[in-house]
Image (tube, helix red, strand yellow):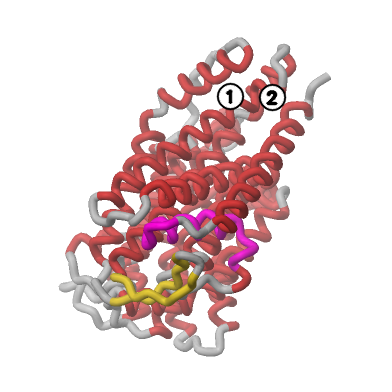
Amino acid sequence: MTAVLTWRFLAEFARRPLNVALLIVVPLVFVTVSAGTLAEFAELLGGRAGAARIQGATAAWAAAFLSGVVGYFHVAGTRGPDRRLAEAGSATRAVVAARLGSALGLAAVAVVAALLALLLRADTTELGRAGVATAMAAATYLGVGAVVGALVRSELNGSLVIIFIWMIDVFFGPAMGGTDAAITRVFPTHFPTLVLIDPGSEHAAPLSTWTAALIWTGGGLAVALLSLLVTTRPTRLPRTAPTAGRRLEAGLRAAWQEYRRNTALWVLLVGLPVLFITLSMAVTPDDPAPVELREAGETSLTVLSMVDVHGAVMVPITVAFLAGLAGLFVAIGSSEADRRLVVAGFRTREVLGARLGIIALAAVVVSAVALGVTAAGFQPRSWSAFALGTVATALTYAMIGVVVGPLVGRLGGLYLMFLLPFLDVGLAQNVMFDAAPPAWAAWLPAHGAVRILIDGAFTPGFDELGGLALALLWLLLTTAAAAAVFARLTAARRM
């Protein structure tokens, strides 16, 4: 029975071929594109592991994130169907074993794809050790995702928690800054990363680094199994009553009440920018960083403090991730209710206005928090331009999330909303890595908004009319696309 159920669960995942493609493409792109850049970034932050080994660690990080997402959705996204399977006569143990087996199979796909990307890089060495470390990191994060899935029912909240854990784990772990702080030893990939970059480390004394990494791996699999057992056990599911409203005002009120009650969502939307931006600025060395700036029509290369540059660029990175996820999950989570509202007599534009209003509010809240946190350690030369670039980035990626979610689903959408902001804002537009963005960055959604933000951060005048026009164009295009997708969804079942 277990083998049959495992096959059915894998076939269920493969019903969306894009999910399978993204499970392979995301680690390939992440490792291939970011390995060299993250190695340079680690050196800037004081990392001592060596470029080759840090590039190898990117495979473990990519596989860990994807496995965490798989673990989360295998618990949070399937608890209802799995309970019904158990109640219908399938043994709980068989259902759990099948879920865990299918999760391990999907995590293995991510591991192989990440290692393939390493193999394609000519400067990669020690592929065998990288493979072991990557597999251990993936298994550990499978447990992280499963625990989050058991504790957090909201898919948006759960996804934010996993992304937060992963970012803290990667950017403050042993590969980036080389810190010996004891707190880093509880990070999920701390010891698997040490296996790759420093297998002789004494961080795990009296145990060896390899032994500690294997204990974390076994622990990850054990908590994944326990989480599945707890959430699959047959229980009586509570009934929920639908909410009602009238027209746009009532729709906005109902949507606001729905998400206002989600306290964890607002804690995450406020807390993540505070922690991530503050910690990023705290660990950045005060070294010189060249940045290309335009002032009074003249372009010049200006040397700035890396602390200030990092403080500025962390703002659009943070808001792009969080606003994109808000757009993704609000659109997906409300699609069925919105269809019923349209069938009941609401106009599509009224329902659309209510949903987009809540999404825009989340984007503005995230932007305001990020700006407030940044103000504690960095003062832009022009707050108005800096804030404009921040809000434009957040709103654009919020609309992208609305488009992506209904088209590719929760899992595929989460993969894309992890990859797109990372490639666009985190790499292409990041002036910490290049004084001026590469030519291909001009084709990405955040290019104009980040140009405005950097201009406001480091120059007193405003010289980015072109960036403003580009940012508005992207915002209009993504909003129009979001409206079209939303109209298609709400009209899909209207009789």
For marks 1 and 2, the one nearer the N-term is 2
Dot 1 corresponds to which residue?
A: 354
Mark 1 vs 2: CB contact within 8 A: no
As drawn, the label of residue 349 is 2
The residue drawn where x is 37% and y is 29% is: 263
**Are there few (<14), some (14-19), or many (20+) residues within 10 Å of tag 1?**
many
Question: Residue 121 location, x and y as percent?
Answer: 56, 84
Q: Which residues are magenta?
A: 441-461
- Left or right of 306 in this view: 454: right
Indicate the quadrant where residue 380 lies.
Answer: bottom left
Q: Amino acid at mark 1?
A: Ala
Question: Residue 332 location, x and y as percent?
Answer: 61, 35
Question: Residue 413 location, x and y as percent?
Answer: 60, 48
The residue drawn where x is 41% and y is 35% is: 265
Separation of marks 1 and 2 at Cα, in angstroms = 9 Å
Queried whether the magenta region covers residue 459, the answer comes back as yes
Queried whether the magenta region covers residue 255, the answer comes back as no
Q: Amino acid at mark 2?
A: Arg
Task: Give 87 or 325, whichever is nearer the viewer.
Answer: 325
Question: Residue 461 location, x and y as percent?
Answer: 42, 57
